[in-house]
């Protein structure tokens, strides 16, 4: 496949709100349709592909028109939950890292106070 076909498919894929098995099957069918239409001759530009199959936004609109609303709503809600869970985990990890860093810093300060409070010196006798 030439770069313009890859760019067109990437532009369509980036518009999908979620990417699961039906969406991948739809994109595979679109890729096959593009290859069948152009055959051996590769399209020169993305505009040439868009003239035949529609802009990426139109392709997404066609998919959304044929998809069941309940399925799309369920997938978008699931994707939103995963996104929130991911952010909660990132925030928790950052807070844990800050706490550990603060604790290590406090231990280091205690060590410096201990070393500075030591009086005297050590004498080592070799016999």
Image: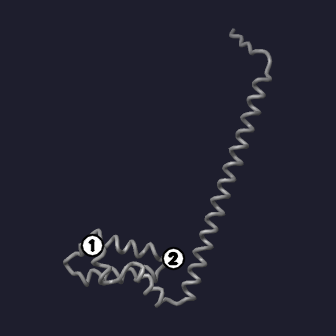
**Residue at image mark 1:** 45
Mark 1, other Cα within 10 Å: few <14 / some 14–19 / many ≥20: some
Q: Give the quadrant of the C terminus.
A: top right
Residue beneath the point at 57% across and 74% down: 79
Picture quadrant where residue 46 is located: bottom left
Residue beneath the point at 56% across and 80% down: 75
Q: Nearer the viewer, residue 22 or 8?
A: 8
Task: Find numbered disc 1 in the image and state the secondary structure of the residue it sits on.
Answer: loop
Q: Nearer the viewer, residue 64 or 112?
A: 64
Tell me which numbered mark, 2 or 1, is placed earlier along the sequence: 2
The relative height of residue 86 versus residue 109 in the rendered view (above or below) is: below
**Residue at image mark 2:** 17
Mark 2, other Cα within 10 Å: few <14 / some 14–19 / many ≥20: few
Q: Nearer the viewer, residue 26 or 11?
A: 11
Q: Nearer the viewer, residue 61 or 124?
A: 61
Residue furthest out toward the top: 127
Residue beneath the point at 60% across and 73% down: 80
Residue 36 pos. (x, y %): 26, 84
Task: Find numbered disc 2 in the image and state the secondary structure of the residue it sits on.
Answer: loop
Marks counted in the figure total 2
Left or right, 113 with reference to 3: right
Q: Give the quadrant of the N terminus.
A: bottom left
Residue 72 pos. (x, y %): 54, 84
Residue 26 pos. (x, y %): 41, 83
Residue 35 pos. (x, y %): 27, 80
The relative height of residue 9 versus residue 61 in the rendered view (above or below) is: above
Residue beneath the point at 73% across and 43% down: 103
The relative height of residue 64 versus residue 2 in the rendered view (above or below) is: below
Q: CA distance from mark 2 to mark 1?
A: 26 Å
Q: Residue 63, labelled with which disc? A: none
Which one is in front in this view, the residue at disc 2 or the one at disc 1?
Answer: 1
């Amino acid at each position: 496949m030439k770069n313009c076909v890859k760019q067109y498919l990437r532009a369509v894929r980036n518009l999908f709100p979620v990417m699961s098995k039906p969406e991948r099957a739809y994109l595979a069918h679109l890729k096959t349709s593009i290859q069948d239409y152009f055959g051996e001759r590769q399209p020169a530009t993305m505009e040439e592909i868009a003239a035949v199959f529609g802009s990426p936004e139109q392709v997404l609109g066609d998919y959304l028109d044929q998809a069941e609303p309940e399925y799309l709503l369920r997938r978008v809600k699931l994707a939103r939950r995963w996104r929130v869970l991911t952010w909660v985990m990132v925030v928790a990890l950052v807070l844990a890292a800050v706490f550990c860093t603060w604790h290590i810093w406090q231990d280091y300060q205690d060590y410096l106070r201990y070393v500075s409070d030591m009086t005297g010196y050590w004498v080592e006798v070799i016999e």
